[in-house]
Image (cartoon, rainbow, N blue to C red):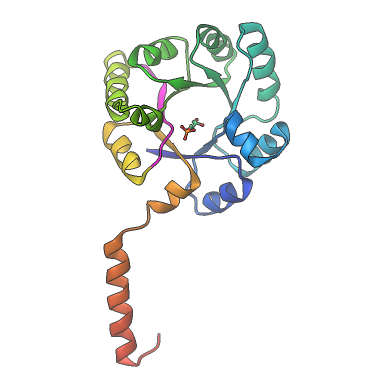
Amino acid sequence: MKFFVDTAEVNDIRELNALGLLDGVTTNPSLIKKSGRDFAEVVREICDEVEGPVSAEVVSLDYDSMIAEGTKLSELADNIAIKVPLTWDGLKACRTFSDQGKMVNVTLCFSANQALLAAKAGATFISPFIGRMDDLNLDGMQLIQDIRQIYDNYMFETEILAASIRTANHVSECALAGADVATCPPGVLRSLSSHVLTDKGLEGFLKDWEATGQKI
Ligand code: E4P
């Protein structure tokens, strides 16, 4: 499973990328607001840092304006994935961009039927929002499994990009369910290395090592 980071904070992106951990980046208008940075400037900087796809989202609701915005965004760098919402106009824009050979991430997916439409519209990525479903006591992980089954049934090449990930458990469950990508906040990616038994074991080893009085 590929790891994308879900942030517009360039320092976090740099640190995770230096570890060789990052396959791409996702941003959204809320993350841009949180960064306090100019949209085009920060996206360009992220694209310089990371080789993989960097999602940048359109903010218009009608087809013509989405095409104008997405075209502008795609000119920022070669690795831009234009993010469009899962609406009728968003799907139309997806088809146009896909026919032009551009990467498209169809976002805000909450049902298997939406995912089916996005695949038929030529989406590069479909983004089901796990955490937001869980917040409403809906089964986000079941949605990932359903999309996996549908895409495999018909050999769709659209990649399942599990989004709105909140916990380390979400990540392993997405991997088990066959998601192609998980986009995680930096804190969740860092938390994947932690285990209480690792900390406890290390503490014991270091105590015993100290007692030997040796040095390496
Ligand atoms: C994905 O592309 C979205 O930017 C993101 O995962 C949304 O996550 P949230 O529900 O935590 O805002």
Determine the residue positioned at 37% across, 12% down.
116
- Residue 80 visible from this viewpoint: no
Task: In this rendered view, identify the residue nearer to me: 69 or 60.
Answer: 60
Which span of residues is magenta-colored?
156-166
Q: Position of residue 96 (x, y in %)?
A: 58, 9
In the image, is residue 164 above or below residue 14? above
SS majority, magenta: loop
Image position of 64 with respect to 71: above or below: above
Left or right placement of residue 38 versus residue 20 in this view: right
Residue nearer the viewer, 141 or 70? 141
In the drawing, does residue 104 fall left or right of residue 40? Answer: left
Q: Position of residue 90 (x, y in %)?
A: 54, 12
**Residue reaching furthest bottom?**
213
Does residue 56 belong to the magenta stretch?
Answer: no
Quarter location, residue 157: top left
Residue at position x 64%, y 29% from top?
78
